[in-house]
Amino acid sequence: MNKKKILLMLIFIIFIVVIGVLVYKKQENKNEEVSEITPLEEMTEEQERETMISLYFVNSETSTLAPEARKIDAKELIKDPYKMLVQFLIDGPKNEKLAKIIPDGTKINNAVLKNGVVELDLSKEFVDNQNGETKQIELCIYSIVNTLTELNEVSFVKILIDGEENKKIGDVGLSQEFARQD
């Protein structure tokens, strides 16, 4: 009987060890399953390159600046981001509740970043085609400033007209560097 008890104990110990190994393996498989998450849908190259930008236009109802979100190709933005963003402002909004504020005929001569300041050189039409109202001129300037300062590297915007500093539009001087205004 002593041999029977030893044999039963040995079988019982082997049984417990086998169960333990099976439980351990099952838990290990669960951990592997969790770490291998696959997306439901693969992203296309085009989707990977898209980025969101905010452009500031005038809200037609409130006469205040309002952002318009746009999805664009990031590769295009990398080429010349400051010119591109201002060109979007010149082209106007896609949302019909927003209005274009930059005067017709305005062209971008140059846009360069220097120590956190974008020096934006615009054509004389930016000054010549303004309506003269101080509030409208300020909205026009801050449409540009708020749009460009959405970029992390831009803190201020300096506006030149045909390469010249210290121009005025009505009562608004362009001699300073403009900071974002919310």
Image: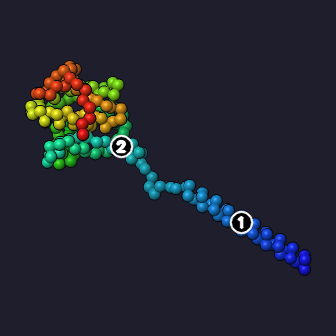
Q: Amino acid at mark 1?
A: Gly
Please tell me which residue lies in front, 111 or 45. Answer: 111
Residue 11 position (above or below residue 66): below
Displayed quadrant of residue 26: bottom right
User: Left or right: where does residue 140 sit relative to residue 79?
Assistant: left
- Residue underneath mark 1: 20
Q: CA distance from mark 2 to mark 1?
A: 51 Å
Farthest left residue in view:
132
Q: Amino acid at mark 2?
A: Thr
Q: Mark yes or no: residue 27 visible.
A: yes
**Dot placed on the residue nearer the N-terminal end, 2 or 1:** 1
User: Left or right: where does residue 137 sit relative to residue 152?
Assistant: left
Query: Residue at position x 86%, y 74% from top?
Result: 7
- Residue underneath mark 2: 51
User: Left or right: where does residue 103 sit relative to residue 75?
Assistant: left
| Mark 2 secondary-structure assignment | strand
Residue 60 position (above or below residue 127): below
Residue 82 placement (x, y as % from top left): 29, 32
